[in-house]
Amino acid sequence: MTRRMHLGLFILGTGSHVAGWRYPGAFDSFQDLGQVQAIARTAERGKFDLIFMGDNLYADPAAHPSYTLRLEPLTMLSALATSTSHIGLGATASTTYGDPFSVARAFASLDHISRGRAAWNAVTTANATTAANFGRSHPDHGERYAIAEEFVGVVRGLWDCWDDDAVVADRVSGLYIDPTKVRSLDHDGSYFQVKGPLNIGRSPQGQPVVLQAGGSAPGQRLAARTADVVFSVVQDFEEARRAYAEFKALLPQFGRRAEDVTCLPGVMPVVGRTEREAFDKLATLQSFVSSTNALALLSDRFGTDMSAYDLDGPIPDLALPDSYHSFARVMLAKARREGMTLRDVYNLMAAARGHWVLCGSAQTVADTLQHWFENGAADGFNIMPPFFPEGFEDFVDLVVPILQERGLFRADYEGTTLRDHLGLERPAPRRPG
Amino acid sequence: MTRRMHLGLFILGTGSHVAGWRYPGAFDSFQDLGQVQAIARTAERGKFDLIFMGDNLYADPAAHPSYTLRLEPLTMLSALATSTSHIGLGATASTTYGDPFSVARAFASLDHISRGRAAWNAVTTANATTAANFGRSHPDHGERYAIAEEFVGVVRGLWDCWDDDAVVADRVSGLYIDPTKVRSLDHDGSYFQVKGPLNIGRSPQGQPVVLQAGGSAPGQRLAARTADVVFSVVQDFEEARRAYAEFKALLPQFGRRAEDVTCLPGVMPVVGRTEREAFDKLATLQSFVSSTNALALLSDRFGTDMSAYDLDGPIPDLALPDSYHSFARVMLAKARREGMTLRDVYNLMAAARGHWVLCGSAQTVADTLQHWFENGAADGFNIMPPFFPEGFEDFVDLVVPILQERGLFRADYEGTTLRDHLGLERPAPRRPG
């Protein structure tokens, strides 16, 4: 079978650009379900594999509005499940501030509701501010990943408690559940003790799809062991190719094949009918950036207050917190490579929060994505529009048809579940012991 | 204004009767959104105030199937929000096994998604089995209520962090959020430390509606202080009237008026076009009860293993756990009053889980509800159909028109939010300090 690209749509509040909501005609509220429904319909028209909703667990009214105001992901995606029919629905839930029973249950429920389209993005929650909303102390990076490893295992175990045929519902005999086909989990680990079984039956995908985005070494190992789809932060082709190869090389030690995990680098496309039109759009977007929110975003991403540094001086020699954000590492490397000032960095950060900005005509954008896809840098892309709806419609209406024409992307859905779109089999339940 | 009845629909898996799913033509899966959507449409056709989804956080494959298999309430109601337009959407969330930040956020999100129809049923989670799914020990009754008091206060505080006009989204100035209209909560209590603000703006109802069902003395105080709607367990008119009067008398000490809280006793209606038809339906339902699941249900309700007692002997002198379930108290009182055997009790428990069973012609059912409503026993009712869809359609198609004709119940919705239906004002945010 021809290898085909996979496309995810990343939804984050009003869009990934810090000031994208100021673009003429842009949607400016993601607390309005109608706007999100319109975006989801566009993504489905573009035959995307999935919509993916990022999340934070704190509000910072001074920062990127998309970080502070949004619908809660699971309720939002459940509402979208009824106004879409094919597209996958991925939500972030924290392994540091959630509990595995509730997470397993909510995603199983979304999988039932959407008839097999649920995906869970397991995040360890980097931002320490979060702890204050949960009356907790923020575990360090290493411990967060140790917790996450166990958490994901518990969730997957809970999803396997029920056999597909455990619900008998035999009106004649009165047997509703066959008790021999339901198992408790009896997990007793370092961080979690969870008895089970889950109080919801095995879901349409068997196991909802698991997404991961950790860029640090422990993050990569967690992804290699547990994820079906991996998002990554990249800034250029060579780096992306190296990261892709390194990640795929990790898989065999966890008994997995390269094709078991779909790697989707994040990219913010700014698309025009001509190069000129695209660069004008980007310039318009960048004109909306204020130094206040750009600095707040930069400080968040770097985990340190950046307002003390000279904006037009060289990049300071920052001691980053322990593997704080891949964004910081990738961005600082690029800045040093290209001799950027701090102002250059914050402008770039304001545009795509540290992700790759791909600006150009539809032809150029399609060519570049094809080049990455065909030369070992990606299995597809996580599309992060700067704003909605136009910033995304440009991609769907101008770029997707070129990819389809070249046979690089599906012309229509060939299945109904997210596993179908990703070419992943529906797993049989693993029985403990 | 004429006082009008309020009606809630209680949804619990396949229905409130332990074997209702065996009734010919009954829905037998509540993991299928299509069935729940059909029920919600029927409730909206019947102009009900709200649908209310009960919940547990454990599975017991040997017990009532409705206790073990169901969609997760918040995801389910979010999905229903898009296929209904007026009816309120109430979900249970635990104050013992949840956290206030997540609960506040999820219900605010549902309120945005449904445009003002969200309600939270705050429960303390009586069943100790739950603890094993959360790696915790189960707090005793008194502590659960102390936690709940604080939890509800924190949630209400988080809902008040944002003023209605805090989201400015001014494209010209670039001001998205007016920081003077957002406050942190800075709650530092005995059980919770929650900084806030919430990462979602003030929702259409200002405060989603709060439901409560605790029957014990601490439960009644919590309800009197915090709830907008109260569900109760009753078995006869005199008892209901006394409980209603006692509860309304509690309200002034919390600075509230009798009309601030809507009291809805639970009732399972079994409705026929004639008395005979109704009693035949009930007999058919009861013929499906097996002693195994009835005893499991009874044991759950009484918090003790009932299989050791003689079914045809007198009611044993049970030492109930600390105010375990109102069901146990109410049911044991009725059993002693009426000289029932244990078998009688379990048959009654199997029918409606301890709630009042009202069986008769549509005329009789309407007359009885009217009598209760007009004589100080209820502000309306929480309707608990034994099974779906017929067990509920009978009520909507046969009883509701009689209530409407008598001017006891709305002929159509007069507003769009649940607060509108309940006659509750939209509150202004309370500012701390």
Image (tube, coloured by chain):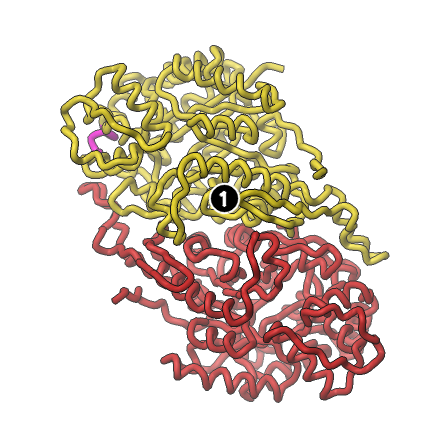
Chain colours: A red, B yellow
Can residue B23 be seen here?
Answer: no
Does residue A296 appear left or right of residue B321 in this picture? right
**Magenta stretch in the rendered image:** B284-289
Asked where in the image residue A426 lies, by quadrant, the reply is: bottom left
In the depicted structure, whether residue A422 falls above or below residue B215: below
Residue A395 drawn at (x, y percent): 66, 70
Quadrant location of the C terminus of chain B? Answer: top right
> Residue at position x 45%, y 38% from top?
B143
Q: Chain of mark 1?
A: B
Which one is in front, A365 or B180?
B180
> Residue at position x 30%, y 64% from top?
A429
In the depicted structure, whether residue A252 falls above or below residue B425: below
Q: Assess whether residue B214 is covered by the magenta stretch.
A: no
Q: Main secondary structure of the magenta part?
A: helix
Does residue B394 appear left or right of residue A135 in this picture? left
Does residue B352 appear left or right of residue A242 in this picture? left
Can residue A173 be seen here?
Answer: yes
Q: Assess whether residue B288 is covered by the magenta stretch.
A: yes
Which residue does the numbered mark 1 point to in the structure image?
Answer: B77
Asked where in the image residue A432 lies, by quadrant, the reply is: bottom left
Task: Point out the residue furthest to the front here.
Answer: B190
Secondary structure found at label 1: helix
Which one is in front, B35 or A214?
A214
Amino acid type, residue under disc 1 in the picture: Leu
